[in-house]
Amino acid sequence: MQQENIVEIIEKIRLGHSDQFRKLVEISQSMIYSLAFRLLCDEDEAKDIVQETFVKVWRNLNSFDTKMKFSTWIYTIATRLCYDRLRVWRRKSVFRIFTTENEMQLDIPSLENVENEVINADLRRVIAKLTSGLSLKQKLVFTLSEIECLEIEEIIAITGLSAEKIKSNLYLARQSIRKKLERM
Amino acid sequence: METKNDLYSQWIDNLQKTKPRLADANQLTDRVMDSVQKSQNSAISLTVIFLRPILAATAVFLIGLLVFQHTDEAEISQTANIRYVIEKTKTKDFPCGNSEVLPTPNYKTLLKQYQCYREKKSADNQDIKAKIAKILNQNQ
């Protein structure tokens, strides 16, 4: 979706057409879900992040500068929420183990969702394995830069880190992942 | 080194291509809209919760101010009445001495007024005595 169309929708919402917010959610929820899933490696948590992100978007829509890219703004909100959650997990030493046995105890998915479940489970395992040894900042920069393919300027705006810090974190993340791939 | 890089870029390519699947997109949209609606309602109730003590405090302050002003006015009118009475009594009962109204009668002026009152009364008594004597003389 073009930035102009999104701005048009936002202007309508600002004018009181709150039904247009649903359109905005439909357009951008998948990209937020994707980012949250890749950072948290958990479907339910990713959905929670989507929900919290849009609540924040709704509350702060009037302060959104339409000159700014909407995707950068919404990514910033979602990334900060994910980062906070990761920090809490790390502080509480929550070990999220992604094994097949662990997944087996969950509800058995319907046939239509089997493919989705398998793809998500594979993705979750791979990302968790590759990024497990990274620091939070390294994980954040790696996901935004290498997986989400964002430009460095956007990463600066989203994370608030300097270009040098982003580069050094990305370098360390790459090194760590390469070493893991060698061992695999 | 090249194979290492190849392996890395291969993995990254796969990760980029494989997007996480969202099976129930509509359900998620509904959930988001519900929470937005709830947050809207909770924002209103939060405003009410925060405003309630402020409004109560303002009401108490205004009531206090009104009561204070009312008692103040009553006191002023009461003082005015007292002054009026003092003035009247001074001019009526104490023609001798200083008849001008003093804003705050002190001990000295009160004594003067008392002395004046006594003098007047003794003069009155003498008059009465003289009148009684006169009546008695006439009867005899």
Image (cartoon, rainbow, N blue to C red):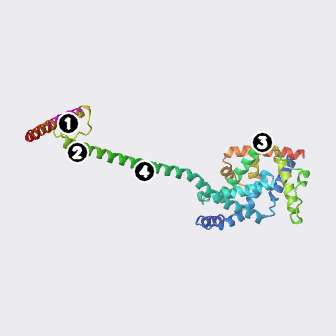
- Kindly tell me whether residue A104 is visible in this rendering: yes
Circle 4 Cα neighbour tier, 10 Å, few/some/many (<14 / 14–19 / ≥20): few
Snapshot quadrant of residue A13: bottom right
- Picture coordinates of residue B126, whole percent (x, y): 14, 35
Dot 4 corresponds to which residue?
B66
- Picture coordinates of residue A6, whole percent (x, y): 65, 65
For the residue marked with disc 4, what is the amino acid?
Answer: Leu
For the residue marked with disc 2, what is the amino acid?
Answer: Lys
Does B131 appear in magenta? no
Dot 1 corresponds to which residue?
B117
Snapshot quadrant of residue A115: bottom right
Q: Share a chain, discs 1 and 4?
A: yes
Q: How much space separates mark 2 and mark 4, taking CA atoms?
A: 33 Å
Q: Chain of mark 2?
A: B
Q: Chain of mark 1?
A: B
4 vs 3, front mark: 4
Relative to residue A153, is residue B1 drawn left or right?
right
Numbered tag placed on residue B88 in the rendering: 2
Q: Share a chain, discs 2 and 4?
A: yes
Numbered tag placed on residue A92 in the rendering: 3
Relative to residue B27, is residue A183 drawn left or right?
right
Circle 1 Cα neighbour tier, 10 Å, few/some/many (<14 / 14–19 / ≥20): some
Badge 1 or badge 2: first in the primary sequence = 2
Find the magenta span and give its range.
B111-123
Q: Are marks 3 and 2 in contact (CB under 8 Å)?
A: no
Snapshot quadrant of residue A138: top right
For the residue marked with disc 1, what is the amino acid?
Answer: Tyr
1 vs 2, front mark: 1
Using the image, determine if residue B70 lies above or below residue A13.
above
Circle 3 Cα neighbour tier, 10 Å, few/some/many (<14 / 14–19 / ≥20): few
